[in-house]
Amino acid sequence: MPYTILEHTADVRLLVEGRSLPELFSEALRGMMELLKPEGVSGESSAAEGTAETNRRIAIASPSATALLVDFLNEALCLAYSHREMYQVSFEEISEPRVRAVLRGRPVNSFGEDIKAVTYHEAEIRKNAAGNLETKLVFDL
Amino acid sequence: MIAKSNLVKVHDWLWEIPRSHRADMRVPARVYASDHMLDQITTDRSLEQLVNVATLPGIVGHALAMPDIHEGYGFPVGGVAAFDAADGVISPGGIGYDINCGVRLLCSDVPVSAIQPHLSELGAALYREVPSGVGRGGRLVMKGHDMDAVLEGGAPRLVEMGYGEAADLERTESRGKLEPAAAALVSSHAKDRGRDQLGTMGAGNHFVEVGSVEGIYDAEAAQHLGLFKDQVTVLIHTGSRGLGHQVATDFIRGMVRAMPRYGITLPDVELACTPFASNEGQEYFQAMSAGANFAWANRQLITWEVRQAWEQVLGDAGGPLRLLYDVAHNIAKIEEYRVGPVSKRLVIHRKGATRAFPGQPVLVPGSMGTRSFLLMGGEKAMAESFGSSCHGAGRRMSRTRAKKEIQGAELKQRLNAQGIVVNVGKLSALAEEAPEAYKDVNEVVDVIHQAGIARKIAHFRPVAVIKG
């Protein structure tokens, strides 16, 4: 399971896993988009009909890989709400201090959850027993 | 997890985790709760989070938790922390992402019997007039100077624009405006996110609720506030929407980077902070104030929308809806308290906690379908809890579990059977906010009342719920 939703009293906690940094970041974005998706529709069909994809270029630098993941997700979240879009990502560069990527956005009419932010709380990228990268992420709802 | 055995009883309604519990604690942590409530509170990580707060530089007195405490991220929800303005910190996580989330209570002049025949129509009109849910924009789009005027002008700016009355401001905490606000410190990301969100409720636990006065505990105080039995009331619960969320995101990110410069290390990065007197601390305080002003402007415009719906449905027979009070429950304020022999300026962080100054109304919404309370702040709040009280019932069940265990459609039927009209954007949102997902608000309020922080004045029962 690349991402799993775990219990949290008030918010949403995801456990995300990936074989590499790009895969971990992609899965985390996919998990967040799943939360944003309007209820009862697939990511694809939530898109407004007859509208084309818009590319949004982002570049972020952060003090650690974990902070980079949280900052990357928050950037995508802000763009998603501001432009009413759902994203998939293509990475141009991803290393510990920085990420450069293109978010490929499809317009949507509404969102499912109102995610206020992705938090640093409990986030820590580490290698799990299977040798994959893994972290928890707590989303403030 | 912190067990009940780690807590020392101060009195029947107050418990302490001594400083000796963990080497990095700078002050003890205290939680207001009954013995029974502690059984539930100790089932999640909220007290560990409270202990983490007790480690922050410049914290004064105690890290405090109200009886509605529950696990958050970084700071627990239902927490109060005071920091010395001279050498303590400010932490955006201690205010929360929804800056100035808060509650306002409107009161009518009519009894509930007068609106009963029109209740379905009123619920539908409120749902139509107050945009809710995620992604539904409001009636105003704020850009450039207009947005900056709201960020620096708060609720008074909306009144200037014709969306309210001067009397509304008299009954709003801080008159609906924090002076330190600086619109220039709010990022373009935040302004973009909030550009069409003024006058919108959002989703999650935000709501507009029509209710009626069901019980009065202090007849003299209730009369003084203009309350009477069976009177129709309207509660509005929302905050600074995406704009405030982004202000918090931007500054937490900035503080994570800045902390090493100040030699600050923390048990949880989400507690990110810098000295209040530093550039980063001051800039956050000014941006947070702008976010708080946006929230007050938001509740002011929603009040106008509620009044529109009220008039559309009831006409002149409905009479006016006057504002009884508006309180913030996610905010930082500069207040002065006696600390030992001297008076000090403190940065009071309230995250899921309400200001409760003596004689000030304190609004405590219950969970959907249950009572909400009006309390009055007491002198003991100034001596014990940095002028603060609880803010609601407090969650006890996760949203995921609530959605698994409770069917939205069934819950709607159950509420309807109790005589409550429900207008909701999506039924699963209703399930997330089911009464069983929350603590018993009666128990929460009783602790506050018994502890002497605030006293019970009246409670309301819901008759119509409007949610995103």
Image (cartoon, coloured by chain):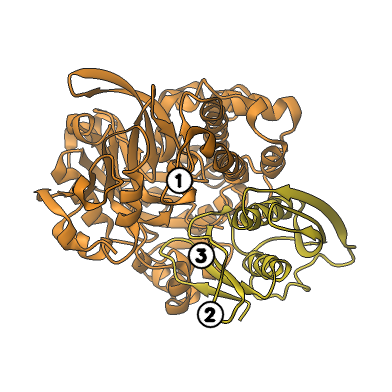
Chain colours: A yellow, B orange
Residue B226 seen anywhere in this rendered image of the structure: no
Instruction: Report x, y in % for residue B215.
Output: 22, 48
Q: Secondary structure at mark 3?
A: strand
**Residue type pointed to by label 1:** Leu
Residues beneath discs 2 and 1 located on the same chain? no
Q: Nearer the viewer, mark 3 or mark 2?
A: 2
Task: Tell me whether circle 3 and circle 1 mark residues in contact (CB < 8 Å).
Answer: no
**Residue type pointed to by label 3:** Val
Residue receiving disc 3 = A12
Q: Residues within 10 Å of mark 3 (few under 14, many from 20)?
A: many
In this rendering, position of residue B443 left or right of residue A8: left
Distance between the alpha carbons at the discs numbered 3 and 2: 24 Å
The quadrant of the picture occupied by the C terminus of chain B is: bottom right
Residue B370 seen anywhere in this rendered image of the structure: yes
Q: Quadrant of residue B138?
A: top right
The quadrant of the picture occupied by the N terminus of chain B is: bottom left
**Residue type pointed to by label 2:** Ala
Q: Residues within 10 Å of mark 2 (few under 14, many from 20)?
A: few
In this rendering, position of residue B436 left or right of residue B318: left
Q: Secondary structure at mark 2?
A: loop
Q: Which mark is residue B271?
A: 1
Chain letter behind tag 1 = B
Q: Quadrant of residue A101?
A: bottom right
Q: Residues within 10 Å of mark 1 (few under 14, many from 20)?
A: many
